[in-house]
Image: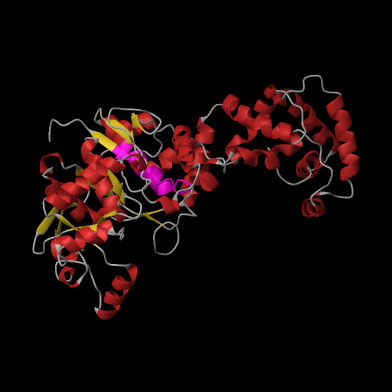
Amino acid sequence: MADRKVRVRFAPSPTGALHIGGVRTALYNYLFARQHGGELVFRIEDTDSHRFVPGAEEYILESFKWLGIQFDEGVSFGGEHGPYRQSERRDIYKQYVQQLLDNDKAYIAFDTPEELEAKRAEIQNFQYDAYTRMQMRNSLTLSKEEVDKLIADGKQYTVRFKIEPGQEIHVNDMIRGDVKVMSDILDDKVLYKSADELPTYHLANIVDDHLMEISHVIRGEEWLPSAPLHVLLYKAFGWEDTMPRFAHLPLLLKPEGKGKLSKRDGEVSSGYRESGYFPEAVVNFLALLGWNPGTEQEIFSLDELVKAFDISRCSKAGAKFDFKKGIWFNHEYILMKSDDEIANLFAPIVANNGVEETLDRVKQVVHMMKDRVNFVYELWPLCSFFFIAPTEYDAKTAKKRWKEYSAQQMTELADVLEGIEDFSIEGQEPVVMKWVEDKGYKLGDVMNAFRLTLVGEGKGP
């Protein structure tokens, strides 16, 4: 195991928008692979045909491209371990289902949903396991002839894993240490359904990880209850020597109250990309959700994260998803980016508001104002007065700042400004200050009225 090449995988289901928790899982897999000179495999888990959403796979790939998380192998990347969509691996799974049946590690069950429901009503906290399986309709209680006839008659069936009670199962977790579970609490999980000729997640996952030579399985904490079952499956196939190391990441929790982050709150599309976040800010923000570098550093490039990442420093406890912190990261990245870069992003927004302006002027505005915004799109409402003269004036500011003598002062100031040849800040300031002093005006009155005249409200640089 020590000499084994590091190979990790990210295996989403194409069931809709990519959740931010999934992105963090992919990011941690990417960092782990890069740090150990390993490979990251992209696999699609599409065995649940009822939940399939057309276009979801392309969207997931596009999101990772935007984030800069690169895969080495898998769907759309190629490789020697394909196919990488589970729906294209039916025949492979069938071989392994048969192997378990032949070795008495699994059995065929014919119980209908109605029969299972009746048994749940009869037995409190019913679990299909070593203590109840002999009361059910399966290949352990029926003769071979009966089983063969039911299959020949086209009766739908499932294949269940035969879990023996009284075993102590150890999950060697890189974050949580040695996790011990007794096999008695596990049910005989369904591994295969004849209805769609597809395996369930549990079997497909184990077979794929083994055949694709996955060395480490880094996934969300929600999969921790499945880990003992997966350990038993590896043993049932005789694959103990190639069993991957597990790491179960902490849950992402709601910003307020209790419970995990909802799918709606965590969509990469509606919440992040289209809302104007920089991909670098999203990556930086996510990296620190449940992982601590052990230093005070908060701003990391992707390369710096690869060097600093240590999976053993991941928290066991859930990580609060702080939206405000995500916004703070985006603001920091705005400050770090050059005026040219922000101006190129802001220029189309200026144009969309019907203004033809040179990039150089847009850049000047960005230089003065970018430290006041968290997102590029916020620049327009803040800076529109640089490009369009106000058509109305903020009533509250006008009432406070516009005096009965302000119109006269502004007319005089316009004449003063028109007479200035050097219109730089250094050229304007002494001339205007001398005029204010010579006239005996109050500087505050003049400047507040001047701002209102130019901007239309009480804000501006």
Q: Position of residue 263 (x, y in %)?
A: 46, 54
Could you tell whether 113 is left or right of 188 in the image? right
Q: Position of residue 37 (x, y in %)?
A: 25, 27
> For residue 162, which quarter of the picture?
bottom left
For the question of whether residue 199 can be seen, the reply is yes
Viewer-proximal residue among 209 and 276: 209
> For residue 132, which quarter of the picture?
bottom left
Quarter holding the C terminus? top right
Could you tell whether 223 is left or right of 449 in the image? left
Relative to 242, residue 340 above or below: above
Could you tell whether 174 is left or right of 419 in the image? left
State the residue at coordinates (17%, 61%). 145
> For residue 347, which quarter of the picture?
top right
Relative to 311, residue 123 above or below: below
Total numbered circles: 0
Q: Is residue 76 magenta?
A: no
Quarter holding the N terminus? top left
Viewer-proximal residue among 67 and 213: 213
For the question of whether residue 312 can be seen, the reply is no
State the residue at coordinates (85%, 34%). 413
Q: Position of residue 431 (x, y in %)?
A: 79, 27
The magenta-colored residue range is 9-30
State the residue at coordinates (34%, 55%). 195
Q: In the current view of this chain or complex, which residue is farthest to the bottom?
A: 122
Viewer-proximal residue among 140 and 245: 140
Scheme by which the image is coloured: secondary structure
Q: Position of residue 280 (x, y in %)?
A: 46, 35
